[in-house]
Image: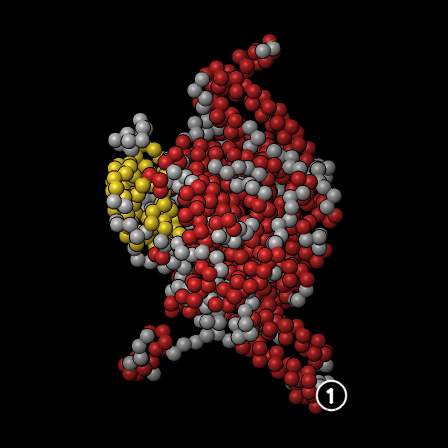
Amino acid sequence: MPIFATARREILSRPLFSLVQSALPPLSDTESEAIDAGNSWWDAALFTGNPDWNQLLAIPRPILTAQEQAFMEGPVETLCAMIDDWQMSWETRDLSPEAWAYMKAQKFFGIIIPKTYGGLGFSNFAHSEIVRKIATRSVSGAVTAMVPNSLGPGELILRFGTQEQQAYWLPRLADGREIPAFGLTSPEAGSDAAAMVDEGIVCRGVWEGREILGIRLNWHKRYITLGPVATILGLAFKLRDPDHLLGAQAERGITVALVPTHLPGVVIGRRHLPSMQSFQNGPNEGHDVFIPLDNIVGGPERAGQGWKMLMSALAAGRGISLPSLSAAAGAFAAHTTGAYARVRSQFNLPVGRFEGVQERLARIAANAYLLDGARRLTCAGLDQGNHPAVISSILKLHATERMRVVINDAMDVHGGKAVIDGPHNYLGNHYRAIPVAITVEGANILTRSLMVFGQGAIRSHPYLLQEIRAIGEADGTRALAEFDAVLWKHVGHALKTAIRAFARSWSGGLFAPAPRAGRATRFYRQMSRYAAGFAFLSDIAFLTLGGELKRREMLSARLGDILSELYLLSGALKRWEDEGRQDTDFPLLTWCMDNGFATIEQRFAEIIANFPARPVGWMLRLFLLPYGRRRSGASDRTVRQCAAIILEPNPARDRLVDNIFIGAAEEPVARLTEAFRLTVDTQPIHDRLRKAKIRDWRSAQARGLLTDQELAQLQVADKAVADIIAVDDFAPEELTGRPVTHALADAAE
């Protein structure tokens, strides 16, 4: 070893090694397994502080194959037509038997299962598109289709199962002979799934008439989607071997096994009713349920690897299923709210002309654009073979939060139309479903404060994980050597990042790197500026706070917000590029970028103001916000342009609301769509009458200003609008289920 390197290691690295070792807590087994599950992707590029935007733009645009497109236009459309969401939610509390049978026959439960096992073998993008389309019709219908294809026995068997498990179970799951559910959450373990007390004891028992080595299971699970109808349960539990039948290790750790629900001791509980959503969900228990060791997913050698398997598989639920529900909500809200704001008039003006309403319309439209861009980018990454756990956490958190925003805005614009429940209320069930999406697969509060940056920093930072693993190395000499090798790479990276952050902030990003992207080039320059600032801020937080940063949840959450905005905005930029740089979409992109940049600067300012070491906070201001916060969000002009996109038929609107279910002519959304068309078509007639200051159609006709055909057009449009504005009402006995008594009637009088 050169003398200089030896001296550096002994004089500089050794004291720093001791300092870092005392400041950073070692990774727990659970944390280590979670970090090893999946991989980093575009998040790692953002963490460098100097992402290569050409690498982003080179990612292939996700597209459907001919077979996938045919499935969308055929079975998916047919299934949507079979679903009556009002009837499901308030009467049957379930899909119809015909819909269940159709989903099985058309292999909706085998979307991701390869054709060699009898499944459809579709891409992640097709999976997402299918869920998104169904969700515009029914959230419960979409959940029923998506759960077997995301976190469940199917994906776990496909990725980790033995050949025997794959050959037996995958064909049965694909054609619906088996209905899967996954048992993870228990009363004792919600977001902290590692705290589960469900256990399996290795023992000998009788299986199919002979004594074998197996597992005796006891568990209590709840919130299990498809649990009430499941025939095969993927069960997570802690495996123990107190008699050392497998070896010296008594505590084997979290394990996942396949448990047929017909076995003695399995108790399928009653149903939950999650926010009035009618998808099958409920608790289940097991009391001394015996299964062979071969029922462990992946076989006995996979005992204790359940947590890593779960974290890896969870990327599908977080990266595909919930973002697809959220993107569906965005597109559906944009279509219905834009149309309703156009047909509904107050003070002789469409309500969409009022600027207060336009603010909400713009936020709906731009968030719909952002959500679908991020969804498509993530699907592209998954279809390249990535399993980006940090990005999946970002998508789960921010897609569902934006779902909440767009649906709340849609409710506000619709007013009483969306408040009064009934078969013609097309928004109410989307509104009620929001808490489910916010809560499942990692509650958003903890995902934001603990996971996005907490895991993202370790997974995605160029050097941090290597440093943590070096200080955890048992061999002291080897540990110091590994730490020394990576430390100085980190130092060099940090110095470059500091220079980039300083130069790009003081220059306003004017000279920051950007691809040739037409009108969007300036946005890339700002993204480069903020990425450098984020990377510098992250390094400073690690350096000054060390392991304390894990406990500073509000600081960690704000850092996670910055990383999340950078990723979501990357998706919006990629969408604009993939769709051919459509000028008519540019206001939507501008709204996303302007508001995203304002959020980033706000988080910078909050971190600076609350940084524990105040001198460090003052220094950060010089590097990140030398001129203070300059971003305030989208301009009023941009807001009006975005609102206008969904208030009139146009290609930008078509792209934004593509692939939503409209339904037959008598369906509420179809009637709204027709009223929207008629209102726009008759607008020139209204304009002519308004210019002549005539409000009575018969008078206009008598004066020759209105033809018979035009009068008929106006009457048809007027009737269509009145029909769509009308709300449901019920006879008292329909709501109570019994006749109204005379006493009640007399009291009412």
The image position of residue 489, as x and y in percent, is 59, 23
Q: How many marks?
A: 1
Q: Residue at x 50, y 68 (%)?
A: 81
Picture quadrant of residue 624: top right
Q: Residue at x 62, y 82 (%)?
A: 715
- The quadrant of the rendering that contains the C terminus is bottom left
Amino acid type of disc 1?
A: Gly
> For numbered disc 1, what is the local secondary structure?
loop
The residue positioned farthest toward the top in the image shown: 3
Which of these two is toward me, 585 or 278? 278
The image position of residue 573, as x and y in percent, is 65, 48
The image position of residue 273, as x and y in percent, is 36, 59
Look at the picture and state if 653 lies above or below 604. Answer: below
User: Counting other residues with Cα less than 10 Å from the Cα at mark 1, is it few (<14), some (14-19), or many (20 or more)?
Assistant: few
- State whether residue 62 appears in this view: yes
- State whether residue 194 appears in this view: no
Look at mark 1 in the image and give the residue it sits on: 704
Look at the picture and state if 381 lies above or below 92. Answer: above
Picture quadrant of residue 708: bottom right
Which of these two is toward me, 746 or 406? 406
Which of these two is toward me, 391 or 413? 391
The residue positioned farthest toward the bottom in the image shown: 702
Q: Residue at x 63, y 39 (%)?
A: 530
Horizontal side of residue 602 vs 579, given as left or right: left
